[in-house]
Structure formats: structure tokens, C-alpha cells
Image (cartoon, rainbow, N blue to C red):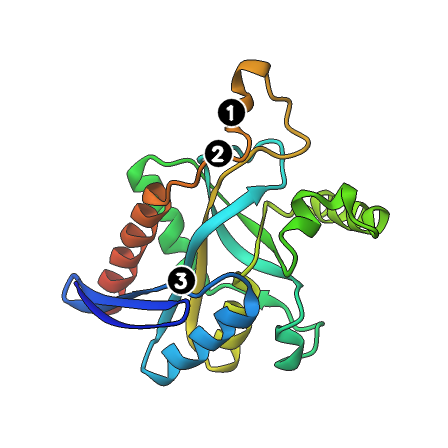
Amino acid sequence: AHFVAQNREYVTWTGTLLGEKVSAVSTGIGCPSTAIAVEELIEAGAETLVRVGSSGSMQPYVHSGDVVVVTGSVRDEGTTSDYLPIEFPAIANIDVVNAMREGARKLGITSHAGISQSKDSFYGEVERTRMPLKQRLDEHWRALIAGGAMCSEMESAALFILCSIYRKRAGGVMQVINESDLAEIAEEDAHKHLTEFDAERVIKVAIEGLKILIEADKK
């Protein structure tokens, strides 16, 4: 792998995986900066884009250290409404989803497949009860949980919407870094809540999933 470029929050390294060119690119936080990265990566020739990052659990059975393979995203952000009407769903590519799930299975890493919430406000989620709109935020959060949302993050909606428009493959793998509000945590396990993010597990899943995709493409 070799360093390609850095501009503001965007850092790009490029190498090869099974003979195919693969780049790792930082997007910054949130959908606005992610949309810029995706626009320019696609212009540069990217065909398959996978968001690899952290997320917060929304279900009591989704635990810290688990990986969520995102199948679709709640568009709880402002960027993608400038691309498509809010009624248009933000959906991951099924081949990418299946490859990432198989990658996690091969590595023996616990994974879940499901919907993420892509939001704009980090503290509006993790500390919503101290916000002026706390009642609305909390009701909205609990409605998403009731609907079955697996995790909360800040980027995948932009990735999925842009890749839908430009006919590219998109997916997302998120490592869970905390326990759900609904989980019953024993006092001795309190350290599991908002633990420091170690990306190694989710990066390994992404790489294994990409290998599966590359091998399938070659066939």
C-alpha cells in the first residue's frame, strides 16, 4: 500500500487485494463530508464503496464488539434530501451485504444484518435527554428501536443514496462500541458502555468481505 493524498479530513491510501486495486479513504464525520468523498471517489473510478466504522447499539441483543452489516439506512440527516426525495430508500447492495456477512462468518465474528440510523447530531443521540427537544428526540429514538433499527451512525445514508444514483455498489460494516439503552448491564460490565473504539475487528471483516466480492467478480 502507498500514500496517495491528503486534503483536510480526507486521507487516501491505495494498495491491492487479490490483484485488484483497493483504496482506504477517510471521509470525516457525517453525511456532508462523506458525500464529497463519494462524489470524488466515483469520479476517480471507484466501483464498489464500503463504509467501515463505528456505531452505537440500538437493540439489547446487539452488543459491544459485534459487527452490524448494514442493509439500509434511516435518512435522519440533511444531505441526501438535496439528491433524492426523502421517500427514496437508502439501501445497500445485496451482493456487498452477503459478502460482508460471509466475511464475518469466516472470521468467527458475531454479526447482525439490519437497518442503521444515519444522523447529523452525535450528541442529539447519545445525550438526547439534555437537549431542548429532548421529548421529541427520545420519542423518535424509541420509534426507530421499535421498528427494528440495529445501530446508529452518521455516514451510510449518503453513501447508499449517491451509489444508487451513480449505479455503484455500496455497503457498510459497523463495529458496535456500546450497549443499547435497553440492555441490562451488570455493574462489573459497565466498562463495555462507550468503550474506546478499536477498528481492527471491523476492518478484518471488510477485507474478508472484499476478497469474497473480488473472487465472485472474477468468476
Q: Nearer the viewer, residue 191 or 204?
A: 191
Residue flagged by tag 3: what amino acid is it?
Val
Q: CA distance from mark 3 to mark 1?
A: 29 Å
Depicted 136 relative to depicted 93: above or below: above
Q: Callout 2: helix, strand or loop?
A: loop
Can residue 23 be seen from the camera position used here? yes
Give the SS element for disc 3. strand
Residue 48 percent across, percent down from the top left: 36, 70
- In the picture of the structure, the residue carrying the numbered disc 2 is 195
Q: Quadrant of the N terminus?
A: bottom left
Q: Is residue 44 left or right of residue 137?
A: left
- Residue at point 57% right, 65% down? 157
Circle 1 residue: 191
What's the residue type where badge 1 is placed? His
Circle 1 — which element?
A: helix
Say which amino acid is labelled 2. Answer: Thr
Picture coordinates of residue 94, whole percent (x, y): 46, 62
Q: Residues within 10 Å of mark 1 (few under 14, many from 20)?
A: few
Q: How many marks?
A: 3
Residue at image x 35%, y 47%?
A: 102
Q: Could you give the CA–CA distance between mark 1 and mark 2, rounded to whole angstroms?
A: 7 Å
Q: Which mark is residue 50?
A: 3
Mark 3 vs mark 2, CA separation in Å? 24 Å
The reply to whether discs 1 and 2 touch (Cβ–Cβ < 8 Å) is yes
Residue 145 at x, y percent in the picture: 70, 44
Would you call the spot at circle 3 few (<14 residues within 10 Å), some (14-19), or many (20 or more)? many
Q: In the drawing, does residue 109 fall left or right of residue 113?
A: left
User: Reading the chain from its start, which is encountered first: label 3 or label 1?
Assistant: 3
User: For the point 64% across and 22% down, which residue is it?
Assistant: 184
Is there a contact, CB below 8 Å, between mark 3 and mark 2? no
Residue toward you, 108 or 134: 134
